Amino acid sequence: MQSKIIISLTFLALVRFVFPNKLDRIINGHYASPKQFPYQTFMDKLDLSNLHGPIGWRRHCGGILISSNLVLTAAHCLDKPDIYAVKIYFGALNLWNVTEEGKQILVVKRDHFVIHNEWDRNIIVNDIAMIKLPISLILNDYIKSVQLPNPEVQYQFSEAISSGWGNIDDKGNMDPKLKYYNPQIVSDSKCEHWYKSSIASAFPASLICIAPNENRPCGGDSGSPLVIRQESNLVLVGITSFIIGDNCGPSYPVLFTRVSSHLTWIRDNENQI
C-alpha cells in the first residue's frame, strides 16, 4: 500500500534547560520495527514567521494518537502564533520513505489546535496540547491509539519506553528512522533535586522524570510519548517536555508532562473544536 496524503483545509531560553526539539535526537537506542509503536506520530510545521525568506515545511515535533481523531503533543510545539499548520505523519517508521506501507499524512490548520490555558514557559508546567483531526482515521495494525493512564497510579520506578525521531549529530543531520530506548522513571524527590537546581520553583507533581542514561533521548522529539507496558497493553504516562541542563550529556535527566495529571483537561477539551 502506498502512503496516503490527505490534505485538510479546515524560548524563552533559561540557562539550565532546553526544549528537546532544539536538540532532538535519541542517542544510541534501538531502531523500531513496523507496527511496534502505532500511536507514534511526527509533525512538520508550516511557519509564516519569515515572510521575506523561503516558506515551506520544516520538521518539528512528535505526537501521540489517543483516539481516531485526537493527537496529544507538547504545548511548546504549537504555541508560536506563526505556526499556520502542521503536517502529521501516522503509521510511519521511515519519514523519508514516500511509499512506506501503512503511512498516512494529514495536514491540519491552526484552528484545530487546543493549547492548555495554563501553559507556562517560565516554569514549564502544563506543557500539553491537543490537535483535533478534521477526519477520523481508520485504525489498523499500523495506526492505533494508545491507552491513557490510571490517575491513581504514579508509575515511579517503572521501566518505560521513550520513542522518537531526531538528529544523529550536532550538525542537524537527521535519522529518518524511528528509534526507542528503555529508561527508568525515578522518584519525584530525585526529580525535585534536579529541577530546583535549574528552576527556582517547587517540583510540580504534573511532571515525570527519567534517570540520566547513556542510551537516552535528547530528549526524543518534543511531544513524543513515554509509555509503560501493563500486561499486553502500552499505557501513555508522559509527553516529552524538556531537558534539565544545557547539553545532552548522560548526566542530565529528561522531564515529561505527566498525562494522568491532565485527564480532566483532555476530557473537557476533546470536543471543543
Image (cartoon, helix red, strand yellow):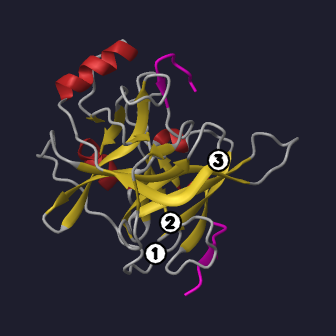
Q: CA distance from mark 2 to mark 1?
A: 7 Å
Indicate whether 68 appears above or below 175: below
The local secondary structure at tag 1 comes to: loop
Residue annotated with mark 1 = 136
Indicate whether 136 appears above or below 44: below
Measured as percent of width and height from the top left, residue 10 is found at 63, 66
Q: Is residue 9 magenta?
A: yes
Q: Is residue 234 left or right of residue 122?
A: left
Residue at screen point 54% across, 74% down: 104
Quadrant of image for the N terminus: bottom right
Measured as percent of width and height from the top left, residue 125 is found at 37, 30
Is residue 272 visible from the viewing direction of this image?
no
Check disc 2: other Cα within 10 Å, few if <14, some if 14-19, many if 20+. many
Q: Residue furthest bottom?
A: 1
Residue at screen point 35% across, 34% down: 255
Measured as percent of width and height from the top left, residue 252 is found at 37, 27
Q: CA distance from mark 3 to mark 1?
A: 34 Å
- The secondary structure that most of the magenta stretch takes on is loop
Of pointers 3 and 2, the one earlier in the residue sequence: 2
Q: Is residue 247 magenta?
A: no
Residue in the foreground of this view, choosing between 27 and 47: 27
Check disc 1: other Cα within 10 Å, few if <14, some if 14-19, many if 20+. few
Q: Nearer the viewer, mark 3 or mark 2?
A: 3
The stretch in magenta equals 1-18
Q: Amino acid at mark 2?
A: Leu
Check disc 3: other Cα within 10 Å, few if <14, some if 14-19, many if 20+. few
Residue annotated with mark 3 = 173
Residue annotated with mark 2 = 133
The local secondary structure at tag 3 comes to: loop
The local secondary structure at tag 2 comes to: loop
Residue in the foreground of this view, choosing between 147 and 230: 230
Q: Are marks 2 and 1 in contact (CB under 8 Å)?
A: yes
